[in-house]
Image (tube, rainbow, N blue to C red):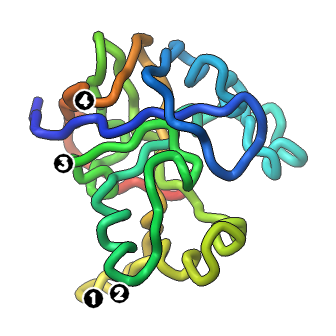
Amino acid sequence: MTTGGRVVAVSRHEEYSFSKPNRASITLLPGLGVEGDVHAGRTIRHQFRMTYEPDLPNLRQVHLMHEELFDELALKGYRVSAGQLGENVTTRGVDLLGLPTGSLLHLGDGAVLEMTGLRNPCAKINDFRDGLLGEMFAIDPVSGDFTFRSGVMAVVRRGGTVRPGDPVEVELPAPPHHPLERV
């Protein structure tokens, strides 16, 4: 296990809304997500996808973003802070986008999240900040591969309480490792 990262902020919202207010803590529920959050549930809770895939398992129980992205965006004139892009957990010091599928994040008082994939950014990001959607994509200069930069999605494997300042420990799955893909 590797350590070094930390939780910067935690957020949840009871209703569908683009942004989520920061909280003093959140409670993660195994197999469901963030207690009291509109996206918690065993089956898909994403508003658009519920209309045509309502019975699929919810692989998007918890949305995480790295605060370093906000630093990059600020250099381009975009002011974004924790919770504003709809994430539940904002981290610093963890290469969330570089983790392989199945990685485990240990946070808080024993909570464990399993990384399921990349968040697919939606056009509502431009409603929040005009032009921001274009910053949520990246092309690898060497391979030419296209990827999303708007955070990662996870499921709750072990519940617990998570607060700002909590350490984040990463446990990689057994090889071979597979990169995160859109979920």
Residue 105 lies, in percent from the top left, at: 29, 31
Front tag of 3 and 2 = 3
152 vs 5, left or right, is: right
Return the mark for residue 141: 1
The three-letter amino acid code for the residue at tag 2 is Gly
Graded by Cα atoms within 10 Å as few (under 14), some (14 to 19) or many (20 or more), the crowding at tag 2 reads few
Q: Nearer the viewer, residue 121 or 166?
A: 166
Front tag of 3 and 1 = 3
Please tell me in which quadrant of the rendered image residue 144 appears: bottom left
Q: Which residue is mark 2?
A: 144
Q: Which of pointers 4 and 1 lies earlier in the amino acid sequence?
A: 1
Q: Is residue 72 above or below residue 20?
A: below
Q: Which residue is mark 3?
A: 93
Who's the residue at 22% across and 31% down the image? 168
Q: Pick the quarter of the image with the N terminus.
A: top left
Q: Which of pointers 4 and 3 lies earlier in the amino acid sequence?
A: 3
Return the mark for residue 165: 4
- Label 3: which secondary element: loop
Please tell me in which quadrant of the rendered image residue 167 appears: top left
Who's the residue at 38% across and 37% down the image? 9
Question: Is the C-beta separation of discs 2 and 1 under 8 Å?
Answer: yes
Residue 127 lies, in percent from the top left, at: 71, 71
